[in-house]
Image: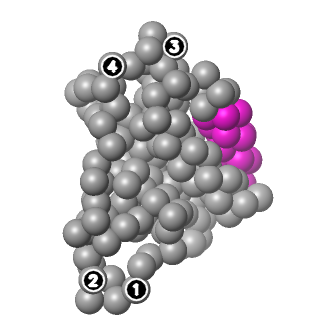
Amino acid sequence: MNVYRCRICGDASMESEKPTHCPFCGAHQKHTTEAAEFVPLGTGELAKKSRENLLRALELQTGNSAFYRGASKVADTPQGKALFSALARIAAVHAEITCRILGAARPEELYETGACSPSHKENLAECHKRKERALHLYRRFLDEATEERVRQVLEAFIEIEADHLALVG
């Protein structure tokens, strides 16, 4: 067994092989390193635009987490429940990462159950829209970011959202 750490969320996992994705935040393997080689990348002072964009990302992540949590409760299959549950957890982890960069407290409503449709099919369609919206915003935020750490995290979020979009088709 080896201990690996994710450069995006900082969490450690014990694995026999380097994981293809972080089990906590979903970051791709390229963001994972052996724990002994892990060096956290500090953010430093945030530019005004990056702070504004990260606050908007936090709002999006918090709302998505609540929506997915609600959708998990009305999904009509065990797979649907698992999908929305996992998406809720990952959106919450992304919000916590964003809070750390901002130096902000975690929103109280982050783990609340949000409103959704009673229809699993409608929730999948809404999920697709939310993933596309997140991808659009993260790409724009990446173009506007000047800080290396912010760029690193946004690049990972874009990859993760693209993976999720493929799941919900």
Residue ID for mark 1 = 17
Mark 3, mark 4: which one is toward the viewer? 4
Which residue occupies 57% across, 60% down? 75
Which residue occupies 77% across, 58% down? 169
Disc 1 is placed on an element classified as loop
- The amino acid pointed to by label 4 is Glu
Mark 2: few/some/many CA within 10 Å (<14, 14-19, 20+): few
Residue ID for mark 2 = 2
Q: Position of residue 148 (x, y in %)?
A: 46, 35
Residue ID for mark 3 = 49
- Among the two numbered marks 4 and 1 on one chain, the one whose residue lies closer to the N terminus: 1
Residue 159 lies, with reference to residue 55, above or below; the image says below
Question: Can residue 120 be seen here?
Answer: no
Please report the bounds of the magenta region as a residue range. Answer: 121-139
Residue ID for mark 4 = 45
Toward the viewer: 162 or 1? 1
- The amino acid pointed to by label 2 is Asn
Q: Is residue 135 magenta?
A: yes
Toward the viewer: 144 or 24? 144
Which residue occupies 44% across, 15% down? 47
- Asked if residue 20 lies left or right of residue 41, the reply is right
Q: Which mark is residue 51?
A: none
Contact between labelled residues 1 and 4, with CB atoms less than 8 Å apart: no
Name the magenta segment's main secondary structure: helix
Q: Position of residue 32 (x, y in %)?
A: 41, 65
Q: Is residue 118 magenta?
A: no
- Among the two numbered marks 2 and 4 on one chain, the one whose residue lies closer to the N terminus: 2
Disc 3 is placed on an element classified as helix
- Among the two numbered marks 3 and 2 on one chain, the one whose residue lies closer to the N terminus: 2
- Among the two numbered marks 3 and 1 on one chain, the one whose residue lies closer to the N terminus: 1
